[in-house]
Image (tube, helix red, strand yellow):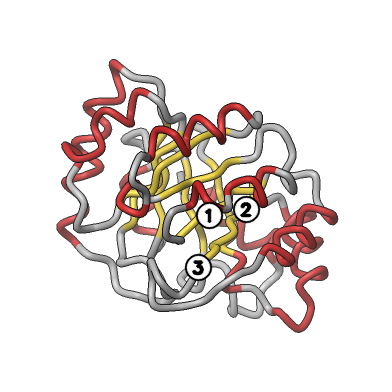
Amino acid sequence: MGFELMASMMCADYSDLGGEVRALDKGGIDSFHIDIMDGRYVQNFAMSLNDLKCIRSITDKPLDVHLMVEHPLNTIHLFTANLHKGDIIYIHPEAEYHPSTTLQRIIDAGMIPGIAINPGTSIENVRMLLRIVKKVLVMSVNPGNAAQMFLPYVREKYDQLLELRGGMDFDIYWDGACGADKIKEFAPLGVKGFVLGTTLLFGKGRDYGETLRQIRGMI
């Protein structure tokens, strides 16, 4: 059974961002998850366009860009211009008047379109967008900050998406409070990938390769 592991780079050591990227790349991470926050859609600022450019210049692995910004259509060109074909961009449907227009811009630029679903967003509200996107990032915590607790009621979203996926063409990804127990439970069910932050990957004082091998060995 194959599943993807993505590094949440907002949790990395910013005193040596380049070193972190190289160590994760060498250790076998599948992609680099980059959280962009504007202080408006969420009450926090995280990574910047310059951080994205830095990471993109160091690794050939895919970048997984999560836009937590208001009206991403206004700035989407800044991100697509600095990514490679096949990189992923997620938007939050609530943040845009016409999210399908923004998703089409992502597609036209050669990127993979995705949506991020907040804990308080119902699947019914985004059901039509599931026919456009290739990736669905389910937030198991409220967006904006690392090191939060898992919200148990989000489990229902995974059940609904796994059922809908049979007739559509999208993969499901986990973001937030991702512990070993969540990977053991949800990877066999069909969740395609997991964003790793402080719960499993960062700040542990361990070699990233060793950590990633241990996680993959659980399944």
- Could you tell which of marks 3 and 2 lies nearer the N-terminus? 3
Q: Nearer the viewer, residue 40 or 161?
A: 40
Amino acid on which disc 2 is placed: Arg
Q: What residue is pinned by disc 1? A: 215
Assess disc 1: are there few (<14), some (14-19) or many (≥20) residues with their C-alpha within 10 Å of its C-alpha.
some
Q: Which residue is mark 2?
A: 213
Q: Residues within 10 Å of mark 3 (few under 14, many from 20)?
A: many
Q: Which amino acid, by three-letter code, is at mark 3?
A: Met
Instruction: Kindly identify which numbered label has been placed on residue 65.
Output: none
Vertical arrangement, residue 122 with respect to residue 149, above or below: above
Secondary element at tag 1: helix
Q: Secondary structure at mark 2?
A: helix
- Labels 2 & 1 near each other (Cβ < 8 A): yes
| Marks 3 and 1, how far apart at CA | 28 Å
Q: Where residue 184 appears, x then y in whole percent?
A: 37, 49
- N-terminal of the two: label 3 or label 1? 3
Q: Position of residue 144 (x, y in %)?
A: 41, 71
